[in-house]
Image (cartoon, rainbow, N blue to C red):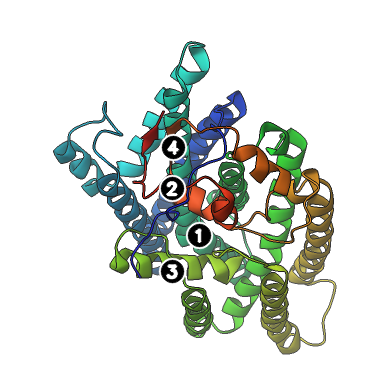
Amino acid sequence: MAWSGCGPRCTPPWTPRYRYLDLLFAVMGTVAFLVDLAADVWVAASYLRAGHYYWGGVVLSLLGLSSLTTQLFSWAWFRGDPKELHREQVSDQTLLTLHLLQLGYLYRCLRALKVGFQVCRDKATTEADRGYAVFLSHDISLLRLFETFLESAPQLTLGLYIILQTSKAETFQMLGICTSFICIAWALLDYHQSLRIFLRDKHKLGILPSAMYFLWNFLLVCPRIVSLSLFTVLFPEYIFLHFLVIWAAMFLWVTLQGTDFMEHAGFEWLYRAVVAVVLYFCWFNVAEGKTRYRSAIYYTFLVLDSALLAGFWVWYNLPLSWDTPVLYALVAALFCCSLGILLRCFYYRRFHPTLQAASQASYDVVDTRALAVDDAAVSQQEPFTGHINQRTYKLSQSFFAGLLPDIGGQQNGHLRM
């Protein structure tokens, strides 16, 4: 299905503000990416030096696959943006070379930091400059999410499997596991933060809600990774089959929801394939409308699947003994799951924009529920000026597109004054 932008009535309700908190997210995200990359290289090199060529090869393969996919999306988005949008950007030939060298994503991060520092430091910046800083940060957030679940999540599963299989943990393994866990939760938080940037300031994510969102995502990812690792210890030859079956089911589910995100149909299929990988590990909404039942079905399925995988390990190791360290890991995973669900419920009852805006709707547009109706009314009075990243805006506000003023067809990155 071809990409249609946000539709003919798509325009943000007000100019998104680029705040110091957004710059902090950009800095921490870039640092996390570099630290995770260094940890991955250290882990792969350590396995290869120890003679574990298969494990080292898997780590390098995951790193290469995630990098190639991220660069492909990054290049496609650069090519799809109007040329006048990135006026001070390097030439197309240099940009292509950077992506071929797997440096396109890092270039995006450094450029976003440069523009973000300029916007925060210079009080005389225009609305267009601030909008451009927001525009750059949005693509980076989504690319970071893709890279994390294509590389960090599978590598985390591999790392825990190796520790459980060998009954020992090296320093480089623990570093790799810690950085992977943190990067997964951080990528989800950063993506959620980028979607909220179109909301009015009072509905944006503050320090406390950000910490809580990070924590409950961290706690809910842990049990999934632990269950996958335990199943891999028992049936290492079947874990890939399990992934293929679940991935195919998620891919079909995403396709049936009719995603319409990329400019070209071929890239749309790639987008759906990557989203299916994300869904293998955690919830990721891809379509507007009520998601209460969709998320309930997904979480029910995920909990049952994870419980079944962990149950295989318990059954094969009966009778259980508290002398087995893995048993403590299972108890910790159950505790993390329960606490994560409680924190998630508390977050949605206290910090969700739907409640903050006293909305009567129960919609969730790609990891965020519908904004308040009064916000939509305000949007008709406050014109938008600046660059529009329709990729992110379509994800975050498509439910309210019909309530916004009709401005006709519009390119991604269109500058509206």
Residue 135: mark: 4
Residue 272: mark: 3
Residue pictured at 33% horizontal, 36% vertical: 107
- Res 65 → quadrant: bottom left
Q: Which residue is mark 2?
A: 390
How far, Cα to Cα, is label 3 from label 4? 23 Å
- In the structure shown, which secondary structural element does the residue marked by tag 4 occupy? helix
Give the class, few, some or many, for how many residues have Cα within 10 Å of label 4's Cα (few <14, many ≥20).
many
Give the class, few, some or many, for how many residues have Cα within 10 Å of label 2's Cα (few <14, many ≥20).
many
Query: In this rendering, would 395 be left or right of 362?
Result: left
- Mark 2 is on which residue type? Gln
| Mark 2 or mark 4, earlier in chain | 4
Q: Which residue is mark 1?
A: 149
| Mark 2 or mark 1, earlier in chain | 1
- Mark 1 is on which residue type? Phe
How far, Cα to Cα, is label 3 from label 2? 18 Å
Could you tell me which quadrant the C terminus lies in? top left
Residue pictured at 52% horizontal, 74% vertical: 257
Give the class, few, some or many, for how many residues have Cα within 10 Å of label 3's Cα (few <14, many ≥20).
many
Q: Is residue 173 visible?
A: no
How far, Cα to Cα, is label 2 from label 4? 9 Å
- In the structure shown, which secondary structural element does the residue marked by tag 2 occupy? helix
**Front label number (3 vs 1):** 3
Could you tell me which quadrant the N terminus lies in? bottom left
Vertical placement of 291 versus 300: above or below? Answer: above
Give the class, few, some or many, for how many residues have Cα within 10 Å of label 1's Cα (few <14, many ≥20).
many
Q: At which x and y percent is residue 242?
A: 53, 83
Foreground residue among 181 and 387: 387
